Amino acid sequence: MIVLELRSIDKSYRRNSPILRHLDLTVQRGDFISISGQSGAGKSTLLNIIGLLDTFDRGSYTLFGKSIRKKDFSKLQYYRDNTIGFAFQFFHLIPNVTVRENLLYSFIASNQSLRMRDLNRKIKLVLERLDLLSVEHQNVTLLSGGEKQRVALARSLVREPKILLADEPTGNLDPNNADRVVEILAQYCQKGNSVILVSHSEDIVQRAGIRYRLSHGRLVSYGC
Ligand SMILES: Nc1ncnc2c1ncn2[C@@H]1O[C@H](COP(=O)(O)OP(=O)(O)OP(=O)(O)O)[C@@H](O)[C@H]1O
Ligand SMILES: [Mg+2]
């Protein structure tokens, strides 16, 4: 089942300086996709478009069979809340509240409902898998870079989005934790979700089932 399809997407921020050019991408249910490419190639731009945080200039975007148009952009909150999850390159955690509160608010914002006891169990489980239980009640602002990075992923996982966009989720991690994160993402796909992972690390991108490199504004199959 196709979950999203981009066809001939163009995007530029400045005239005569295209970032994405006739870019095509099809994502199926359960796909684990990695995207690598030079710094500035447009990887985060592409994730922002897929995640409905930015618009595109030309082309078509179909998400779960629905055509996404620029004019509908302000009406797409449902998908941002319930369908697509982000683990941002620069974390974007809610500052000065605890790790637990970051996960809690993320879940509440997704408009899903769960009994408090079950939600607490879910939060603990996600934190445990990312080795974050010991910092559950700490202020996120005081965490290390690698801890913040894992909280960014935990915050997304707790709402179980059908499409998870992970922008450099292992950039600040030691090899053990990086391994753990990729394993969690792979398992997340096996449950029928789709993951698009952006990374500069050769070891990390190799672990995805489908590998692309973003080059000259397009995705090219890589290392298959
Ligand atoms: N909001 C914006 N306004 C203007 N230019 C932008 C904006 N966002 C990104 N750019 C430019 O678009 C290009 C692609 O940026 P992007 O962040 O997508 O690259 P990236 O592949 O994610 O790089 P990195 O690997 O360093 O994270 C860069 O040249 C950047 O300066
Ligand atoms: Mg980036």
Image (cartoon, rainbow, N blue to C red):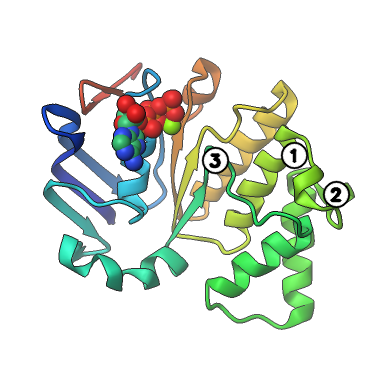
Secondary structure, mark 3, is helix
Q: Name the residue at 79% across, 60% down.
A: 124
Q: Is residue 209 visible?
A: no
What amino acid is at disc 1? Answer: Glu
From mark 2 to mark 1, how far is it between C-alphas? 9 Å
**What label sits on residue 156 in the rendered view?**
none
Please report whichever mark, 2 or 1, sits nearer to the chain's N-terminal start: 2
Answer with left or right where residue 56 lies relative to residue 172: left
In percent of the image, x 46 and y 36: which residue is there?
197
Residue 23 visible in the displayed image: yes
Mark closer to the chain start, 1 or 3: 1
Q: Mark 2–mark 1 contact, CB under 8 Å?
A: yes
The residue to which callout 2 is attached is 135
Q: 10 Å neighbourhood of mark 3: few (<14), some, or many (≥20)?
A: many
Query: For this rendering, which residue is in front, 192 or 6?
Result: 6
State the image quarter where residue 212 is shown.
Answer: top left
Marks 1, 3: nearer the viewer: 1
> Which residue in the protein does label 1 denote?
147
> Upstream in the sequence, badge 3 or badge 2?
2
**Residue 100 appears at what percent x and percent y?**
77, 61
User: Is label 3 in contact with label 2 (beta carbons under 8 Å)?
Assistant: no
Residue at screen point 74% across, 26% down? 176
Measuring from the top left, give residue 128's x and y in whole percent. 80, 50
Mark 2 Cα-neighbour bin, 10 Å: few <14, some 14–19, many ≥20: some
Q: Relative to 119, is 110 on the left or the right?
A: left
- Which mark is nearer the camera, 3 or 2? 2
Residue contact at pointers 1 and 3, CB within 8 angstroms: no
Quadrant the N terminus occupies: bottom left
Q: Nearer the viewer, residue 197 or 97?
A: 97
Tag 3 residue = 186
Query: Is 83 displayed left or right of 5 in the figure?
Result: right
Q: Amino acid at mark 3?
A: Ala
